[in-house]
Image (cartoon, rainbow, N blue to C red):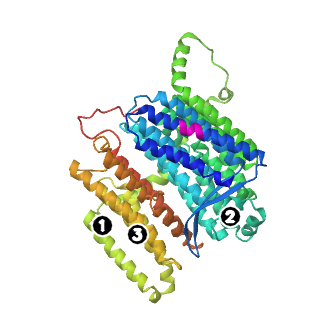
């Protein structure tokens, strides 16, 4: 039966390709392709699970494809199927089918009809890849697809200011989750000395043997997994992104942020449960996190004026309870709770447009006296304080800005004096010095040589901070992202056993994507004369092909799995020593902030209200 697992990825991929190639005006064809693909997938999953249960429901593992192999690294795609995968795949297919059917009519004659169904099928592909994953690398592949499809769906109404702005915010939080997953992959390589599969993680003796002598690494991996899960499932302190994600169409809000994507953090905890099961401190931490998230999200939900925001915070509160259930080892209850919460939130979001009109009519014709609530039992001072805190959403967004984004912008603003000519000259000098140092590294004292990877990685990280905060020239921001990758490659080269073919594999994708992106910027500048990152320009309306071309370049330069850089990033991390935690953090920060900076360039140039006044300007609020 293992060989059948791959077909659950082939079908969504074929559907995505067919809708991508379809004519924009053929709504019936596009919707029928999506409908048939998801329905066929649903029927196939039901039949497969029935057969799997009949044959004894044993865990299935399929090693599908080896992408890179040498003495130190083995990068392969692996699929794994158990009861967790069965529940998530069945729920995913069923809810996607319902939402697809609903969207055929809800989005009729919408400008982005084809774009919506393309993105939904792309999301469905990433979701199935994530829940079928048999190792961290395959999971990260699906994880990245979910992130970019989420960005595209939130920014679906791309002529408005708020959807595009909130799409960048949500993508930024997703990238924080990527840091956790990247660091967990890196530490797991050093702990197990292999590309560990989830099937092997179920081997208690093997896991406990490795953790007995490396308990700190085990705690580090578990904390990294928790960060990734909390960011993906909107747990504290990342909760504020979920209501902002509701700027997209109602069907995408239902499938993404009510049911499937928001529960991927729970899936990650369930999948890695055998690893941290015996780490009591981690289980206590997950319980506390889930408890506080549930309490705070419930309070915030009670004061929301928007029905979609109420549903979002209600979902966050329930996921906090699911986190507690997973931490207590109640995996079956967590799966049942996931299914119930996903169904409920999907239904609530799909009927939310009608509910608003019903409630408006009800308040005029049906008087209801005020009901006694929990808050009425508190003192007025406490009640009012909680009310104000809930209105301000406990300052969660301010907190994230204060500890993350504002410091990055401050660091980048110190480099505002750098222009494009001085940037190229400075990089050429630094890189020439780095190569000379690498050639003659045997003549450099041991203490200084050990610091060189951190020095060059720090230079690259500063460049990426500048790219993130750049408000004027897209050329400067784009070149700094490319230069950051070259500096990272140079930094890792000083470690032992780094092959030239691995560096070449990593940089090939960067060079190709960087060159295509720069050519796209030149073409846009030629047509529009002046381009800037100071505001959203909306050039996608007049240059849709150029916009798509630049989006592909952006994905390539961020390590999305369309170039060899995706494999190269994993190889780069495999050569960071276990003692080089600071280097690992700097490299992961560079990858994450670099991805945000690249998406920001794309959004500022091509999305948002059009800069030209003869185009219709929508309201800032949706």
Estimate how packed mark 1 is, as few (under 14), some (14 to 19) or many (20 or more) residues with alpha carbons within 10 Å.
some
Mark pair 2, 1: CA separation: 41 Å
Give SS at disc 3: helix
Give the camera-side residue of 469 and 343.
343
Q: Is residue 552 above or below residue 385?
A: below
- Measured from the top left, where is residue 226 in percent x and y? 63, 54
- In this view, the mark in front (3 or 1): 3
Mark 3 and mark 1: Cα distance apart in space: 14 Å
Find disc 2 in the rendering and name its residue.
218
Question: Is residue 302 something that shows in the picture?
Answer: no
- Residue placed at 55% from the left, 10% from the top? 365
Q: Nearer the viewer, mark 3 or mark 2?
A: 3
Which percent across, then down, holds residue 103?
50, 31
Q: Is residue 587 visible?
A: yes
Count all numbered tags in the image, as a single digit. Answer: 3
Q: Earlier in the sequence, mark 3 or mark 1?
A: 1
Residue highlighted by disc 1:
423
Mark 3 is surrounded, within 10 Å at the Cα level, by few (under 14), some (14 to 19) or many (20 or more) other residues, namely many
Q: Residue at x 45, y 30 (%)?
A: 107
Q: Give the camera-side residue of 376 and 487.
A: 487
Question: Over which residues does the magenta segment extend?
Answer: 36-40
Q: Is residue 40 above or below residue 517?
A: above
Residue occupied by mark 3: 486
């Amino acid at each position: 039966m293992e060989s059948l697992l791959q077909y659950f990825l082939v079908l969504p991929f074929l559907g995505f390709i067919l809708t991508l190639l379809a004519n924009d005006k053929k709504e019936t064809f596009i919707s029928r392709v999506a409908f048939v693909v998801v329905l066929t997938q649903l029927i196939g999953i039901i039949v497969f699970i029935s057969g799997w249960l009949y044959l004894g429901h044993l865990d299935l593992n399929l090693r599908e494809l080896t992408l890179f192999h040498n003495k130190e690294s083995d990068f392969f795609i692996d699929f794994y199927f158990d009861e967790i995968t069965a529940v998530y795949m069945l729920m995913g297919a069923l809810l996607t089918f319902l939402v697809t059917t609903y969207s055929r009519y809800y989005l009729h004659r919408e400008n982005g009809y084809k774009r919506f169904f393309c993105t939904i099928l792309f999301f469905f592909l990433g979701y199935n890849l994530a829940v079928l994953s048999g190792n961290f690398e395959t999971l990260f592949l699906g994880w990245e697809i979910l992130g970019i499809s989420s960005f595209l769906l939130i920014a679906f109404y791309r002529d408005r200011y708020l959807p595009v702005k909130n799409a960048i915010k949500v993508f930024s939080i997703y990238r924080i989750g990527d840091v956790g997953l990247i660091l967990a992959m890196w530490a797991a390589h050093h702990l197990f000395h292999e590309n560990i599969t989830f099937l092997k993680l179920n081997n208690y003796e093997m896991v406990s043997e490795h953790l007995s002598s490396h308990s700190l690494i085990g705690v580090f991996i578990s904390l990294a997994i928790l960060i990734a899960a909390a960011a993906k499932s909107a747990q504290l302190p990342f909760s504020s992104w979920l209501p902002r994600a509701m700027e997209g169409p109602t069907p995408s809000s239902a499938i993404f942020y009510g049911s499937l994507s928001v529960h991927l953090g729970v899936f990650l905890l369930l999948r890695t449960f055998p690893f941290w099961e015996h780490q009591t401190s981690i289980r206590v931490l997950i319980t506390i996190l889930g408890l506080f998230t549930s309490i705070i999200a419930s309070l915030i939900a009670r004061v929301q004026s928007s029905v979609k925001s109420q549903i979002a915070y209600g979902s966050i509160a329930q996921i906090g309870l699911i986190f507690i259930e997973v931490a207590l080892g109640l995996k079956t209850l967590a799966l049942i709770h996931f299914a119930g919460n996903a169904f409920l939130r999907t239904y609530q979001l799909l009927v939310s447009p009608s509910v608003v009109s019903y409630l408006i009519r009800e308040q005029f014709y049906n008087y209801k006296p005020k009901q006694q609530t929990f808050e009425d039992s508190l003192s007025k001072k406490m009640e009012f304080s909680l009310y104000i805190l809930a209105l301000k959403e406990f300052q969660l967004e301010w907190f994230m800005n204060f500890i993350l984004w504002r410091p990055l912008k401050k660091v980048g603003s110190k480099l505002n004096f750098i222009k494009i000519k001085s940037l190229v000259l400075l990089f050429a000098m630094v890189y020439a010095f780095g190569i000379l140092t690498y050639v003659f590294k045997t003549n450099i004292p041991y203490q200084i040589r050990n610091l060189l990877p951190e020095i060059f990685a720090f230079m690259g990280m500063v460049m990426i901070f500048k790219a993130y905060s750049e408000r004027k020239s897209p050329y400067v921001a784009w070149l700094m992202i490319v230069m950051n990758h070259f500096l990272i490659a140079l930094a890792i080269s000083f470690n032992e056993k780094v092959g030239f073919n691995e560096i070449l594999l990593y940089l090939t994708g960067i060079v190709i994507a960087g060159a295509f992106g720069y050519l796209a910027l030149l073409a846009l500048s030629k047509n529009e004369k002046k381009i800037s990152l100071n505001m959203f320009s909306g050039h996608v309306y007049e240059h849709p092909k150029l916009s798509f071309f630049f989006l592909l370049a952006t994905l390539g330069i961020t390590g999305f799995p369309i170039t060899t850089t995706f494999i190269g990033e994993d190889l780069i991390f495999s050569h960071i020593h276990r003692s080089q935690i600071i280097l690992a953090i700097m490299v992961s920060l560079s990858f994450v902030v670099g991805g945000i900076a690249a998406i920001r360039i794309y959004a500022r140039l091509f999305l948002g209200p059009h800069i030209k006044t003869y185009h219709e300007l929508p309201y800032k609020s949706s």
